Image: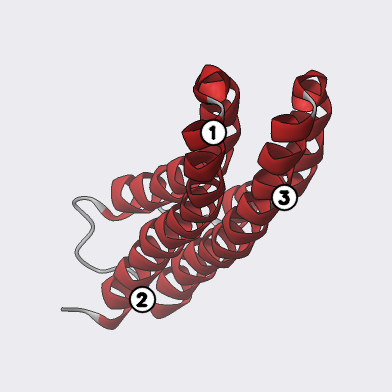
Amino acid sequence: METGIAFAVIGAAASAVLGGVGSSIGMGLAGTKATGVIAEKPNLFVKVMTMTALPGSQAIYGLLIAFMIYLGIQGVTDLSVSDGKQYMIAGMLMGFSGLFSGWFQGRVAAGGIGAIARNESLLVSSIILAALVETSAIFGLLMAFLFLPTVA
């Protein structure tokens, strides 16, 4: 495999895997808290499920950048090392922002689930707080788009 293509593939893998890991960690943290809450208050299932799903978007962002990288290198046989490294940087930007924002969004969502268990009216406030953490993933997504090279 040519070196430029190898760098691009590493970027695509980093974006998809790290974004997915961040979402999995975040949803796991929130889901653990949600399971405890619905054991005592099953009527809160929809509210805590909503909070649990919030960290899942980082996996979607990671897959989006991985697909963009794949589409960029599809059919290219002589990708320069420079362009390959740009793809790798884009993938790593998205991957690491997805990993950490998913992880910490899950922590905030878990706290929100605890708050909802005590006071159901805190759902919207809890969603807003968890969504604030998402902004770093969105910034990572935007930066990844900027780093994607234009390969003719």
Relative placement, left or right, of 144 versus 152 is right
Location of mark 2 (residue): 7
Q: Position of residue 146 (x, y in %)?
A: 64, 52
Location of mark 1 (residue): 40
Location of mark 3 (residue): 108
Identify the secondary structure beneath mark 2: helix
Category of crowding for the residue at label 1, using alpha-carbon neighbours closer than 10 angstroms: few (below 14), some (14–19), many (at least 20): few
Residue at 15%, 78% (x, y): give it: 1
Marks 3 and 1 in Cβ contact (< 8 Å): no
Closest to the camera, between mark 3 and mark 1, is 1
Identify which amino acid the numbered label 3 is placed on: Val
Check residue 95 in the rendering and tell me which mark sits there, or answer none: none
Category of crowding for the residue at label 3, using alpha-carbon neighbours closer than 10 angstroms: few (below 14), some (14–19), many (at least 20): many
- Res. 106 visible in picture: yes
Q: Can you name the residue that lies furthest to the front here?
A: 40
In this rendering, the answer to whether 97 lies above or below 67 is below
Which badge, 3 or 1, is on the more N-terminal residue? 1
